[in-house]
Image (cartoon, rainbow, N blue to C red):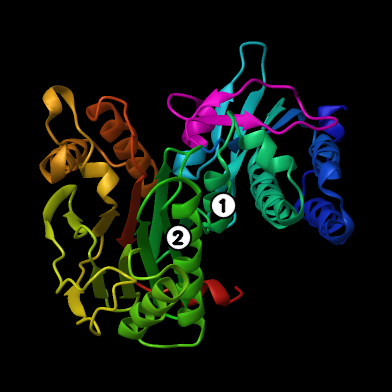
Amino acid sequence: MDEESVDRSEGFGERLLGLLLDRAPHLPPQLIAPLIAEEVGRVGGRDVSILLQDYAQELLVPLPGKKLHASQPEPVNGSAAGRAFLRGEAVEVPLARGGLRMHLPLLDGSAVGVMVLTLDDVGEDDRRLLRRLAGLVADLLVTKSAYTDQFFLARRREPMSVSAEIQWGLLPPLTMTLPQVAVAGILEPAYRAAGDSFDYALNDNILHMAVIDAMGHGLDAAVMATVAIGAYRHARRVFVSLAEKYTYMDDAISGQFGPDHFVTAQLMHLNLATGELELVNAGHPAPLLIRDGKVVRQLESATTLPVGFGGEEPRIREHTLQRGDRVLCYTDGIIEEHIAGGELFGEEGLVRCVNRLGERPSEGMRADLRRLSHTLKRERGGRTSDDATLFMIEWRGGAADHLAVLD
């Protein structure tokens, strides 16, 4: 296509995006790629790739499809695609033969992947149109993934256990980034996970969160985790208090599995307007409060019995966060791994890693948590003999009301 003949005005962009919106409700998953490649071609783009994060969060792997460029997987660390993915910002790379390779993050509140394409030249109209197109592509991938295995198969890099299949199907999006708050979670071992899980939901101004660890390993632990999260979601959706959520989960686990089975849990409410954090701890390691990159203290609470043991109604502990504070939740698989010489890695090892990484400039919460996870694994000798989960919240404060006002 003659570069001078390419129409990239806002009016053209509106028609192009409108066409995609019109077709999206009827579009089979396998036709997403050809349609996107055609849309990009209309603005003079070529060699389009759509990269999705693999389950181990190490690679960005190409989605196969007609008209898509058959690229190779790219590492999240050290690649232009990885920078775009982690930072949530477009990355442009000049090509030796002329033109630019554009890397556009696919964002829908969470990070889905990266769209990559080549343009001979790029102006502000192009950037605006491509940014909007990338947002629509992200929404399409999230929506269509509910009824296809195509995207799952692209992301899977090795065989996955049945228990891990259950857990990945149970999890919410691994990340959520909003003006007032961000959350991110990492589950290891990605392809053999069983009893660890987390969940969250933003209802009005309250962020509801839970981190759990079901006893045992394999399929039994995955089934117990499923019941625990199901009971938690039910309690959350009938608007009971934080303490009552514990009771709902406790009744479900004891009623289904009997007195010899249990789940440790942390249940939290965060008021996005005030930074007030309510915490119930049911036999779980206490979360860490991180401020300016350093661990300030544990967020202690009166610990009640694990879910399933029929503990008394738990007491709620309140903490007040400052803007920019991060709360790190983790399961015991992080700290109970034995390292060289048989020594436990321990909470001291976790705090040491957090503080050391906090001395480096932040690359954003998602990138920082991923870097922490990989650092912890190296520090533990590369072993993950038990499920090891990290879940982080960053409270930013402020309001998002301006996003609902049209200029």
Instruction: Identify the disc placed on residue 238.
Output: none
Q: In the visual, does 51 lie left or right of 280?
A: right
Q: In the visual, does 201 lie left or right of 51?
A: left
Q: Is disc 2 surrounded by few (<14), some (14 to 19) or many (20+) residues within 10 Å? A: many
Write down the residue under mark 1: 166
Write down the residue under mark 2: 225
Q: Residue furthest top?
A: 97
Q: Residue at x 53, y 54 (%)?
A: 110
Q: Residue at x 22, y 35 (%)?
A: 360
Q: Earlier in the sequence, mark 1 or mark 2?
A: 1
Q: Nearest the camera: 293 or 400?
A: 293
The stretch in magenta equals: 56-84
Q: Nearest the camera: 183 or 4?
A: 183
Q: Quadrant of the C terminus?
A: bottom right
27 to 39, vertically: above or below: below
The answer to whether mark 1 and mark 2 are in CB contact below 8 A is yes
